[in-house]
Image (spheres, helix red, strand yellow):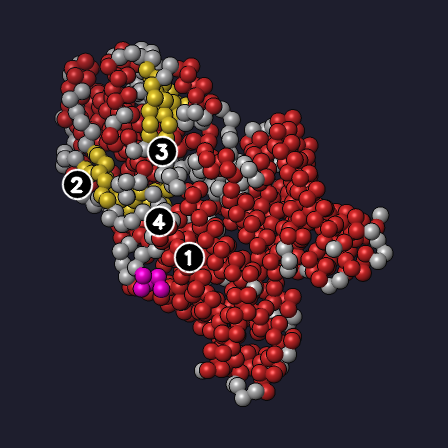
Amino acid sequence: MKALTVAGAGIRRLLRDRTALFFMIVLPILIIVVIGTVATGGDRVRVGLADQGSGPLGTRLAADIEHSPALDVRRFHDQTALARAVRRAEVVTGIVIPADLDASLQGGGSARVMLLAEPGNPDQQAARAAIQAVVGDHAALIQAGRFAAGQAGVAFEQGLEAAQASVGRAPVAAVRISTTGGSKVLPKGFGYSAPTMLVLFVFINAVAGASSIIESRQLGIHGRALEAIPPRTIVAGEVLCALATCLIQAGIIVVVGSAAFGVSWGSTVGATALILTWALVGAGAGVLCSSVFRTPEQATAIGPTLGVALGMLGGCMWPLQIVGPGMRAFGHLFPHAWAVDGFIVLTSQHGGLADITRQLAVLGAFAAGLLLLATLQLGRRLTA
Amino acid sequence: MRAALLIATKDLRQRARDRSALVLGFVAPLAIAALMSVAFSGTTHFHARLAVVDNDHSPLGSALVGVLRSPDLAAVASVRQLAEADARSAVTSGAQEAALILPAGFSAAATGPGPVPPIEVIANPDHLISGRLAEAVAQGFVAQLNADRLSVQAAVGAGATAPAAELARRASALQLPETVVDRPSGQHELDAISYFAPAMGMFFLFFAIGFGARGFWTERREGTLDRLAVAPVRPSTILAGKALSIVVYGLASMTVMWLVTSLFFGARWGNPVAVALLIVDVVLAVVALAALVITWARTERQVDSLSSVAVFGLTIIGGNFFFISAAPTVMRRLALVTPNGWALRGFIDLATTSGGPRVVVAPLLAILTFTVVVGALAAAQARRLVVG
C-alpha cells in the first residue's frame, strides 16, 4: 500500500512537469506525424518530369508517364530545376521530353527521351525500366499511326487516330502482376510510425525518467522516507511509478494513433500483452539507470541517446529488412528489435497472442533480468 | 575583451567537467553516425532478386532470360531460373523478391493473330519495387510484339487493302520510333552518411541551447551574476563571454563530427571553406536561440521546457531525423523555416556538387536572417536580466 503512495507521488510530480509532458505527448505525436507522412509512397519510384513543350504527342507521353503505377511523378518547369532536384535526391531520375519530339515523330524520324540521373545508381535502373515501359507503349502508338498512314495512304494524324481507336482491340501480350506471401515489415505511413515510436518513446522516457529518482535521492526525499518505510517498499514504489509512466506513454500513443491516424494495432489481446511486457522492460531499464547514473543531467543526456541508439538497432528508425543480416542479428541482442517484430506479426501478418509468444518470451526475459538488477541496485543505493 | 574571454574559459572548463555535455557534444553524435554508417553500408542501393520461369521452352523464353541477364540490368537485379513451383514458394518466403513466369504456348500464340497468354509477374508484398521492375521488363519484352500487332490493326482500321498476313509481315520489320537515353547528371550521389552526419551533428549541437541557458540561470540563482554586475564589467561583456563559450563548444562539436565522419565513415561534406562558413552560421543561430530562451524563461523549469521545444521542434521540422529529400513538397518547404533546414539544404548541395561557398550563399543568408531576428528579440530584454 505504501508502495502505491510512493508511486502516486512520483506520477503526480511527473504530471506537473511540463518538460516531461512535452516529451511524453507533444514530441511522440509530432514525430509520428512527420515520419508517418514521409514513410508513405515507398512502392513507387520518385521521378521528375520536364516537358519542354514539344506538342500534343509530348503532352500525351507526359500524361502516360504520370499515370504509370510504378512512378511517383513531380512536374518541373525547366531542365535546370529538374537537374537540381535529381542532385538533391528529391527525385531518383529526371525525365526530359525534348522540344523537338513532336516534329521528329511526325516527320518520320525517331525521338529520344532523356533521363537525367547518376548512372551508377541502381535505384535509377528501376525507374528507367518503368519509364521505358511507358515510352514503349507511346512509341507503339506512333509506330502504328505511321504504319497505318503509309499502308492506307492517309495523313499521319488519321493513321494515329486509327491507331488510337485500335488500342484495346488488337490482341496484345499482357503482363499480369500479383503479390504473394505475408509482409515482414510494418505497414506504410502511420501504421509504421506509431508502433515504432511507441517502442522508442516508452523506453526513452523511462530511461530519462531515472532523473526524477536520482533527484529524490539527491534532495534527501528517499532518506526521509526511509525513516518511515523499508527500502524494499520504496524500490517497489519507484518500479510501480516507472511502470505506470511507461503505460501512460504507451496508452497516449495507442489512443492518439487509433483515433487521429486510424492506426490498427492488430489483435487486442496480443497488443495488450506486448505493450505490457514492453512497459515492464522500460520500467526495469529506467529504474536500473537511476542507480547507474550519478546525476539527473547524466540521465537526461545519456538516457535519450541510449534510447535512440537502441531504437536504431531495433528497427524503430528504419525497417531492419533494409540492413544486412549481421546488423539484423546484432539488433536482436537488444529488446527493441523483438518488440518491433511483435508489432509486425500483429499488424502486418494479422497474428494473435499465440503468434507472438517467442517475442513475448524474449521480452519477458529482458524485463525480468532488468527488473531484478534494477531492484537489487536501487535497494543497495538506498541502504548504502 | 579580456573579461569576456575569462568568462568563456570558465564556462568551458565547467562544461568539460560535466560529462553530459561531452556525451551530447561529442560521443553521442559520433556513436549515432557510426551506427548509421554501418546500418546503411551497402543498403542504399536498390538490388532486386528476381526469378524467371520458362514454361514455353522456346527461343522467346531464352530471349526473356537474356534480357533479364543483360548488362543493363546486371547492376539492378540478380536473376535465377527456376521451376514454377520453386519460384512461387521462393517469392512467398521472400527468398526471391519477384518472379516472371512465361506461360506455355506463348511463342506459338505470339506468332499467330489470336490472343496471347499473359506473362505473369508475382511479387513479395515487401518488395513491390522489385515487382514493378519485373513488370516493366516484361512489358518492355512484349512492347515490339504489341506494337506490331497494333500497327496491323491500325492499318486495317485506316483502310489499308493488303491482306492481314502481308501487313503482319511488313509490320514485323518496324522498329519502335522512341528510345530512352541516359544523360549522366555529372554530380555526386547523396548517400545516407553524407546526409545524416551533418543532420545528427546539428541535432546534438542544438542541445547547447539548453546548456547555455541553464548555465546562465544557475549563475543567476547562485548569485554569480549579481557579483559580476557590481564588478567593473559591462553587461554586454558578460553576455559576450557566455556567447563565446557556446560558440567554442558548438564549433568543436561540429568540427569533430565533420573530421571523424569524413575520415572514418566516408561522409562527403564538400568544399571545406563553405562547410566551415555553414557551421559558423549555424553555431551563431544556436547562440541566438540560447539567448532567446534565457530572456523568455521566467524559471529554470521554463528554461528546460523552452530549450526542449526549440531543439526538438526545429530538428523535427528541419529534417534532421529523416531524409528530407524524400519528404512531400510541403514538408520540404516547411523545413526552410528553420535554420537547420537551410543548413541541411546547404550541406546537401555541398555534398552533391563540387561548388565552393557560392553554392551556399542562400542558406548562409537565410540562417543569418534567422539569427538576427532571434537575436534582436533576445537583445530587447537582455539588459533587464543581467542587472536583475
Disc 3 to disc 1: CB gap under 8 Å: no
Circle 1: is it few (<14), some (14-19), or many (20+) Cα within 10 Å? Answer: many
**Disc 1 designates what residue?**
B257
Q: Position of residue A175 (x, y in %)?
A: 35, 23
Element type where label 2 sits in the image: helix
Q: Is residue A261 above or below residue B215?
A: above
Q: Which residue is mark 2?
A: A103
Residue depth check, mark 2 versus mark 3: number of the one nearer the observer? 3
Q: Which mark is residue B47?
A: 3
Eye-nearest disc, 2 or 4: 4
Hey, what amino acid is under mark 1?
Met
The quarter of the displayed image where residue B215 is located: bottom right
Subunit of mark 4?
Answer: B
Q: CA distance from mark 4 to mark 1?
A: 12 Å
- How far apart, in angstroms, are the residues tagged by discs 2 and 3? 38 Å
Q: Which residues are magenta?
A: B272-276
Q: Earlier in the sequence, mark 3 or mark 1?
A: 3
Outermost bottom residue: B232
